[in-house]
Image (cartoon, grey):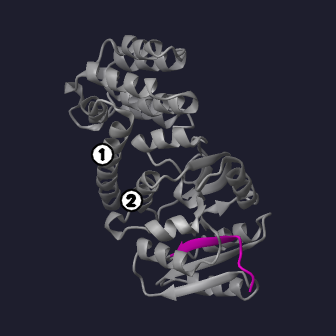
Amino acid sequence: MNVPVVSVVMPVFNAEDFVGQAVESILQQTFRDFELIAVNDGSTDRSHSILQDYASHDHRIRIVSRKHRGLVDTLNQGVEAARGYWIARMDADDIALPQRFERQLQWIEQTKADICGSWIKKFGKVDGNVIKYPWTDEANKIRMIFYPPVAHPAVMMKKSIIEALRYDKEWEKCEDYDLWDRAIRAGCKITNVPEVLLLYRYHDGQISSHSFIIQQQLAKKIRRRYLEYVCDLMKLENTRIHDLFKLREPFYCQQDMNHIDMALIDLLKNTHGEAQATVLSCAKPFYYKAAACCPDIVARWTRVNQCCGLPVDRKITFNLWLLSTFNMGHDSRFFKILKKVNFLFSRSD
């Protein structure tokens, strides 16, 4: 058999309701030179028989089936079985748009990226929000301070990179965030195609509340170690940057907003273009959260922007004024309503 350009690695665990749609979306790709490796991680439903039916009609589908061992082992086994130069991730409950592989390979050629994601659109139990990720490498490395720089199921990356770094079981439930941290330290370039190329499904069978708590705890540790790396690289004041993230803590009202303002200014002065816009976009929710406890929050946000020669977004200052004037804490009913209807947060947040 010819070696394919792209190997699609798709973990499958009890996904009978969705896996057929996921496979169909891969088979309908405009770029045809791929193999689909479906790793059946001990499913107890009809997932395996559904996969077998598709494999019997398309030789590009390969099924690896074994006892249940969890996502990280499943991903690593899929990568080991892959023969392509590029690994494309896919989840068994999502839908790839037909031009996904074609556009990602074009974008990789254009940007010389090692890891390439795309925008994603939520569907299912949510209202179709589009999550927009930065396209430049600099902006993605800044976003990594706050959130993952790419959507894991929308990623295409060099097989040699993932073979060398591998997913780490110690960070399961946050294995992708850990991988991006280590990839950046290894010198990898990360970009995103500025288009929706994946539909990301929300449904009842996803991560439990218990798993979510563990995920957040692991993410905090990864973020902390990446922050140390960035502060050293950019010669930033470590204490100030850490104070910015204290706004996530329960007693954020006690934080020194002067330190937080300076941390934001430090980041803005060390970035340019899309990376600078990413800093503001990621920091905005922190200031929204602090607004109820900070009467001069509008003046602070304005001063931060002006110190860096940036225009002040009137919608943001109005939101800050509203939250501050009416003392709308982040745990208040009105704050949650405004967030839910996208009044506070744009569709790129």
Q: Earlier in the sequence, mark 1 or mark 2?
A: 2
Residue visible at 31% across and 48% down in the picture:
225
Above or below: residue 249 compared with residue 159: above
Residue visible at 30% across and 43% down in the picture:
228
Q: Quadrant of residue 15?
A: bottom right
Q: Which mark is residue 106?
A: none
Q: Which residues are magenta?
A: 1-12
**CA gap, disc 1 and disc 2:** 14 Å
Asked whether 5 falls inside the magenta stretch, the response is yes
Q: Position of residue 241 (x, y in %)?
A: 31, 32
State the quadrant of the N terminus: bottom right
Q: Position of residue 232 (x, y in %)?
A: 33, 39
Residue visible at 29% across and 51% down in the picture:
221
Q: Quadrant of residue 63?
A: bottom right
Amino acid identity at mark 1: Arg
Asked whether 120 falls inside the magenta stretch, the response is no
Amino acid identity at mark 2: Cys
Q: What residue sits right under mark 2 in the picture? A: 174
Q: What residue sits right under mark 1 in the picture? A: 224
- How many numbered discs, if any? 2
